[in-house]
Image: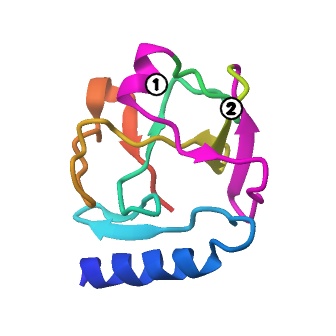
Amino acid sequence: TIMNRLLTSAFALILAAGSALAAPTMTAENAGGAMLTNADGMTLYTFDKDAEGVSNCAGECAAIWPMLAATADDKAEGDYAVIDRADGTKQWTYKGKPLYTFAKDAAAGDVMGDGVKGVWHIARP
């Protein structure tokens, strides 16, 4: 089931937490197919107004769409990379697209942010 896969993935991430974190390769499934999630199983999204490797979501936008934060110790891997945001923080990207969660998603698997204002979309592998 989806919950079993999420729990297995979360357990694997916890085991790896002793060293520098690698890229967030968590995935789940919904009616549209595979989707990227954070370590808590929350859906990740992309923003059409971002440029390649550059986040254009700050201020009020960032309060509604929290970034998938990275640390200086996180290591890019495969299609995942870490970018420096204008405010000096670090953010994960997938294939150059910055990744975000959505404040209105309350539980793992929620996808309330998909299609918001026609510019927010579920991040898919």
User: Coloring scheme of the render?
Assistant: rainbow
Q: In this view, does 106 lie above or below 76?
A: above
Whether 68 is among the magenta residues is yes
**Displayed quadrant of residue 50:** top right
- Could you tell me which secondary element the residue under label 2 belongs to? loop
Q: In this view, does 113 lie to the left or right of 23?
A: left
> Looking at the picture, how far across and down is residue 35, in whole percent?
40, 61
How many marks the image carries: the answer is 2
Residue located beneath label 2 in the image: 89
Whether 8 is among the magenta residues is no
> Mark 2 belongs to which amino acid?
Thr
**Displayed quadrant of residue 69:** top right
> Mark 1 belongs to which amino acid?
Ala
> Looking at the picture, how far across and down is residue 5, in whole percent?
35, 82
Q: Is residue 46 left or right of residue 30?
A: right
Q: How far apart are marks 2 and 1 (CA)?
A: 12 Å
> Looking at the picture, how far across and down is residue 18, in whole percent?
68, 74
Which quarter of the figure is the N terminus placed in?
bottom left
Q: Residue at x 56, y 67 (%)?
A: 25
Q: State which region is magenta.
A: 59-86
Q: Residue at x 30, y 84 (%)?
A: 4
Q: Residue at x 26, y 60 (%)?
A: 109
Q: In this view, does 87 lie to the left or right of 105?
A: right
Q: In this view, does 79 lie above or below 52?
A: below
Q: How crowded is mark 2: few (under 14 residues within 10 Å), some or many (20 or more)?
A: few
Q: Between residues 33 and 3, which one lies in front from this camera angle?
A: 3
* Residue 110 tag number: none
* Residue 62 tag number: 1
**Residue with the most extreme front position:** 18
